[in-house]
């Protein structure tokens, strides 16, 4: 048994009779004062398994009961290289051992539903890609550029053709796990999508009791995987067969039946899942409105990942036809707003294999730039929070703060107060879009580092107001050419920085030691 | 007297004594059953003038009374080349004679406050530019990159140093008019800004009665100019010395005292002027949220001009540092949303002369592209209206229309209805920014022409659903390279168009005759 690695017990027994999903198989793992209860599962061929993810090293006593009875002792040795599952920490993430985790994700929705050759090719591509998180579905996907049947299905069928969630197809689950484990071994977190609406097989419209039975089996198998995150759905709001209360029940079921309390969220098409709910660990958002990240950070006080913001590619669809440059810019925009971003690639292809849907190889120009950004971000002394200054922050003031500002009195030339008064008078929809347009892509790590992305701004100069009692190095970054040029050293207070007057520039300011 | 041209009567008399703004000098011009009353003004040196803009040819009888008494007859000959003042017509503009006017404006705020050499240079530049409208101020402007004193001031000063609006400086007004007339002679409409907040001389904080006296004199002098539009203010909401009711009084005063009923609007920094007010002819908007144009067209049922959407240049400020490409794109975005756009240029310069502020010469890359777009637009059989299809129009549905759509019933796979339900549930600010991001830059001229700008979309193909009973030519346009390539002829119904997979493309579809 190793800290932060899946510990598995296997027992032989007679196969369950009518169904083998919700079997009676429980285990407890006790280390010192702490006992963790987990459920086991039937893996076919007379094999029963119990999995457990130890988070503390030490002496464990385990006890299995139900379909199998057994007990034993294990010494859990301290982690060597493993960091444990990722958790939310404020507006950011870290592994269980405290190591920061900065998500730079990609998307291969139906990876697990492709044939082995394509899966191999995709995993090989992931090995050389800058991504440390992947969004992928359990169920196959039926959508444009993605109509193939999967190699196998998660359940057996009843005679009437409906899916029997009580009889999981263990071949499917073993194959899925093998894929997940290979990806996990690349230090890539798996944001596993439990439901989605793009379906022709019936998985999107199972009865709710079957949804829960499916989840029960899945949780028994996968909860002990250190790399797993739960995404209740891709575009939960387009799943016409489930009501909001179905979703809430699903959320509760996953949270309660996951002994490891993995990260949990749900992904929207339009209306966000309510990220303020207690079991939700982070905001998993589809949007192009990246300007709103500071507002959402303030609202939810949880990490914000823009898990879909359009894909690099050339599809007819607006969501699948941004340039590599734009994809890279969106990563910069998210990061320089205190959030995170997820990649996807949708290039029309003769073989009908699009990365975002099925995997294959990466063809775009953004991954190199995302790697460049990731390296910069990982070099900073801590995570970034929005750096709110001037008019770009007017939309974040509370009514009380506004009142206070205005009661302070103002003179005719006090344009900030006049702006506030005017903003209050705007029609709400006009105000929302206007405030969005005032956003600046600026983030900071306390007074240790400041990062501004200028995006499409073509300024030839800019001014930063830095703390006067500290000294900084100011670097000019070309986010597309991936160059870094030191512009100033020992900078302090108000500093003017020369910019080249073209798009795609960033300025990184780091405190000198 | 010529139709659509300023007719001027000059009389000599003794100079007024204490003040010469609100003098008693009235005139009537009668043609057939129609009598128009105008007021005259004192132009210094014992000269009294009365100006009139005849809109109908015919026999006129005029009568002047007050400081001067006279009467006479004039034959007004039909226009030869002049089209008269521009009026709003639905969501678009046309000259008084019905000729369409498609505004392609620029901005030189303090043009009239520059020395003669710079004014000459600016007018020479305008002669070769694609702009047919200019935004400029009466008063000098004090702001970044624009701190010079004007050659002369509009009023005399009292002994205490305050401006005496009762004593206009006729040299100022004669000079201003000469500049306006030279620009008007280039077939450029003048969107004359009557007030603005960027001031160190006191013109932004005159007492309200002085504001009205200033306007009275200005209207007597300039109302008969065919090329004039009234912009009550630039950024009225940042004018800290005027209340909303001051502004309403100003609006009313201008409208009532302008016998020619010139176009009238007021320009915001944040909250729009209420364009639904009866005297307001069109929406003069500052915004970067160009996606909202169809919503505003629907709300106000008046033409929408985005009179400030950032400027091509390299200033530190976000509003003054977009590329020429982005400026050109914004023109395309406005036009392909049913609105119009205004240009400005803000390049840092050794001589401190920035086009947007003071004039000089144009240095940017957008004017050529704006010329290219203007030519295309003027070749269409009529003005463009938003072309609303699919999800891009969900934000424009009324609550009743939404109810109707949803009551029609929907199936789980009916994603449009699911989207509508989800959108209804969104928090209002999230909904506003989300719907904005669904906007497509698509406009149409009935079934005669369709124009889509793909902006940053890099699609390699797209599909258009055209009327099945008509035939169309489909052209691919590179808005930056300014190329037009016919892709299809005799197209009808659902047509697939190949795109080059790069940014900045547009498709123009015109009906074949």
Image (cartoon, coloured by chain):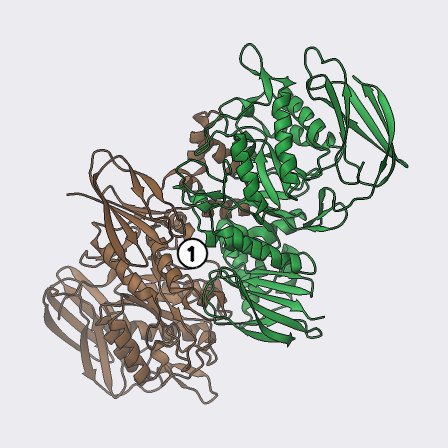
Chain colours: A green, B brown
Q: Position of residue B371 (x, y in %)?
A: 27, 62
- Circle 1 is placed at which residue position? B274
Residue shown at the point (67%, 56%) measured from the top left:
A383
User: Numbered disc 1: what chain?
Assistant: B
B31 or A325, nearer to the observer:
A325
B12 or B454, nearer to the observer:
B454
Task: Answer with left or right where residue A247 lies relative to residue B243.
Answer: right
Tell me if residue A230 comes above or below residue A241 in the rendering. below
Q: Position of residue B295 (x, y in %)?
A: 41, 47
Q: Position of residue B39 (x, y in %)?
A: 26, 72
Q: Position of residue B95 (x, y in %)?
A: 22, 59
Which picture quadrant has residue B284? bottom left
Task: Answer with left or right where residue A295 lies relative to residue B128.
Answer: right
Number of numbered tags placed on the structure image = 1
A426 or A139, nearer to the observer:
A139
Within-10-Å neighbours for mark 1: few <14, some 14–19, many 20+: some
Q: Quadrant of the C terminus of chain A?
A: bottom right
Task: Answer with left or right where residue A222 lies relative to residue A441.
Answer: right
Q: Quadrant of the N terminus of chain A?
A: top right
Tell me if residue B36 comes above or below residue B50 in the rendering. above
Which picture quadrant has residue B170? bottom left
Per the image, label 1 sits on a secondary structure element best described as loop
Q: Let me know if residue A123 appears in the view.
A: yes
Residue at the far right in the pictured view: A32
Q: Let me know if residue B256 appears in the view.
A: no
Residue shown at the point (54%, 41%) measured from the top left:
A107
């Amino acid at each position: 048994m190793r800290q932060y690695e899946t510990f598995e017990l296997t027992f032989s027994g007679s196969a369950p009779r009518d169904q083998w999903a919700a079997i009676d198989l429980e285990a407890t793992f006790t280390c010192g004062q702490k006992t963790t209860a987990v459920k086991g599962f039937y893996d076919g061929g007379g094999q029963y398994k119990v999995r457990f993810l130890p988070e503390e090293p030490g002496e464990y006593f385990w006890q299995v009961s139900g379909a199998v009875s057994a007990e034993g002792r294990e010494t859990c040795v301290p982690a060597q290289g493993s960091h444990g599952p990722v958790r939310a920490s404020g507006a950011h993430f870290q592994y269980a051992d405290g190591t920061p985790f900065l998500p730079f994700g990609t998307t291969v929705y139906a990876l697990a539903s492709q044939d082995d050759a394509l899966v191999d090719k995709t995993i090989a591509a992931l090995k050389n890609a800058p991504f440390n998180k992947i969004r992928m579905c359990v169920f196959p996907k039926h959508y444009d550029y993605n109509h193939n049947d999967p190699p196998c299905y998660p359940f057996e069928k009843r005679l009437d053709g409906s899916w029997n969630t009580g009889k999981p197809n263990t071949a499917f689950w073993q194959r899925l796990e093998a894929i997940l484990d290979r990806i996990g071994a690349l230090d890539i977190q798996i944001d596993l999508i439990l439901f989605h609406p793009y379906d022709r097989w019936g998985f999107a419209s199972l009865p709710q009791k079957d949804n829960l039975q499916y989840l029960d089996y899945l949780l028994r198998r996968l909860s002990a995987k250190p790399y797993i995150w739960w995404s209740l759905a891709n575009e939960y709001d387009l799943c016409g067969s489930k009501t909001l209360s179905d979703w809430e029940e699903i959320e509760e079921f996953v949270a309660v039946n996951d002994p490891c309390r993995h990260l949990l969220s749900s992904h929207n098409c339009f209306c966000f899942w309510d990220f303020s709910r207690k079991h939700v660990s982070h905001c998993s958002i589809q949007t192009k409105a990246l300007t709103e990240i500071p507002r959402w950070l303030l609202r939810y006080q949880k990490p914000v990942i823009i898990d879909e913001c359009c894909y690099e590619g050339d599809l007819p669809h607006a969501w699948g036809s941004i340039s590599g440059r734009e994809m890279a810019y969106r990563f910069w925009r998210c990061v320089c707003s205190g959030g995170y971003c997820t990649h996807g690639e949708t290039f029309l292809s003769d073989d009908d294999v699009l990365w975002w849907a099925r995997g294959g190889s990466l063809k775009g120009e953004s991954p190199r730039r995302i790697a460049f950004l990731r390296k910069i971000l990982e070099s900073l002394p801590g995570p970034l929070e929005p750096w709110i200054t001037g008019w770009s922050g007017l939309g974040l003031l509370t009514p009380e703060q506004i009142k206070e500002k205005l009661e302070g009195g103002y003179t005719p030339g006090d344009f900030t107060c006049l702006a506030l008064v005017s903003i209050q008078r705007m029609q709400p929809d006009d105000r929302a879009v206007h405030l969005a347009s005032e956003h600046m892509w600026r983030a900071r790590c306390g007074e240790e580092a400041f990062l501004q992305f200028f995006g499409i701004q073509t300024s030839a100069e800019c001014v930063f107001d830095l703390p006067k009692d500290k000294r900084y190095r100011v670097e000019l970054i070309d986010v597309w050419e991936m160059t870094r040029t030191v512009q100033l050293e020992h900078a302090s207070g108000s500093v003017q920085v020369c910019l080249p007057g073209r798009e795609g520039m960033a300025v990184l300011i780091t405190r000198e030691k």
